[in-house]
Image: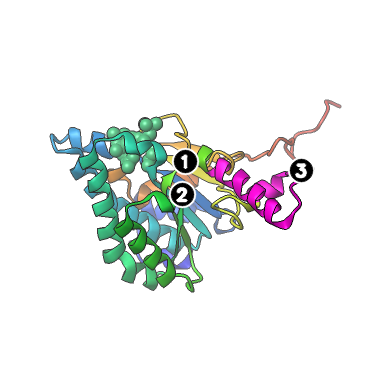
């Protein structure tokens, strides 16, 4: 997390929070459900689009902070397969903002060594958006720093269905369909996030206590952190608060704690 100190100023809560963190126990992979853009806007009597626009700055800051912390991966939920239910104008605004983000942020992503990836049904995106997204993925493909997964046209159930179909297709081509059995490794290897460790920490903004079809398989043992802060207000300090909270958790993965005796003696 050396690079983080370059942008923090001594004194204040942010500095104290950063100092309280154990660099050896940072989450390797953080996943974020970026929620509350609409409410941020309506509280200001602004159109929902203004909330989405303000949310872009929170994405920028979160990506940079995770890169400076030296994390392995950040997965952000930008558009769900269910978000197509929204009015056409709102959906169009989201695509426009995504394209602006990609164009504007590419130099910063490169400078921070970020490798961009798209997770979701990329084929279902409007042509221009898909092309620009894949171009940014390609342009950052040899970077070796933080991997940023943009979950776009993403659904956890859709991902599992796609994984199962990919397994079937591969077996059909190999002629091994007869008697095929699938195990956890095979499913994990066909997810959009194949090869990445599961998220250690799942953050959801705007106080909603649900997962909304995000990374259903991968969050099996993620620590969940929900903040009332609305996404456009989410700053570096909020991310540090979430990580500090994460470091207080005891992760048991179904086992027992090392410190407590198994039976009373
Ligand atoms: C999250 O904010 C952004 C997307 C889902 C694209 P919302 O647009 O869901 O904001 P709220 O939940 O209506 O406040
Ligand atoms: C989840 O937020 C999807 C994204 C953040 C992109 P939603 O606002 O769509 O979720 P619900 O509808 O409140 O569950
Ligand atoms: Mg929402």
Residue corresponding to mark 1: 155
Tell me, yes or no, whether the highlighted magenta stretch contains residue 161. Answer: yes
Which quadrant would the C terminus be assigned to in this image?
top right
Q: Nearer the viewer, residue 190 or 12?
A: 190
Q: Is residue 263 left or right of residue 12?
A: right
The reply to whether dot 2 and dot 1 touch (C-beta < 8 Å) is yes
The answer to whether any part of residue 23 appears in the image is yes
* Residue shown at 80% from the left, 33% from the top: 261
Q: Position of residue 204 (x, y in %)?
A: 42, 39
Residue corresponding to mark 3: 181
Q: Is residue 31 left or right of residue 258?
A: left
The span shown in magenta is 159-188
Q: Is residue 237 left or right of residue 20?
A: left
Residue corresponding to mark 2: 120
Q: Position of residue 76 (x, y in %)?
A: 42, 49
* Residue shown at 59% from the left, 55% from the top: 194
Q: Position of residue 28 (x, y in %)?
A: 56, 55
Of marks 1 and 3, the one in the foreground: 3
* Residue shown at 33% from the left, 68% from the top: 106
């Amino acid at each position: 997390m050396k690079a983080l100190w370059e942008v923090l100023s001594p004194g204040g809560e942010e500095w104290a929070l950063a100092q309280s963190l154990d660099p050896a126990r940072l989450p390797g992979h953080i996943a974020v459900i970026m929620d509350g853009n609409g409410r941020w806007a309506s509280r200001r009597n602004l159109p929902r689009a203004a909330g989405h626009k303000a949310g872009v700055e929170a994405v920028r800051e979160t990506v940079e902070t995770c890169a400076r912390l030296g994390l392995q991966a950040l997965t952000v939920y930008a558009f769900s397969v269910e978000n197509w239910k929204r009015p056409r104008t709102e959906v169009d605004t989201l695509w426009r903002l995504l394209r602006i983000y990609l164009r504007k942020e590419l130099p910063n992503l490169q400078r921070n060594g970020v490798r961009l990836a798209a997770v979701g049904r990329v084929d279902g995106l409007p042509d221009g958006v898909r092309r620009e997204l894949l171009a940014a993925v390609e342009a950052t493909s040899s970077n070796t720093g933080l991997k940023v997964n943009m979950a776009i046209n993403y659904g956890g159930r859709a991902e599992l269905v796609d994984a199962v179909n990919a397994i079937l297709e591969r077996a059909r081509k190999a002629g091994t369909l007869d008697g095929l059995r699938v195990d956890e490794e095979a499913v994990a290897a066909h997810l959009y996030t194949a090869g990445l460790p599961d998220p250690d920490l799942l953050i959801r903004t705007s106080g909603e206590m649900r997962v909304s079809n995000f990374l259903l398989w991968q969050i099996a043992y993620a620590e969940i952190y929900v903040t009332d802060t609305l996404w456009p207000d989410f700053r570096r300090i909020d991310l540090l608060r979430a990580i500090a909270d994460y470091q207080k958790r005891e992760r048991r993965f179904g086992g027992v704690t090392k410190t407590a005796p198994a039976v009373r003696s």
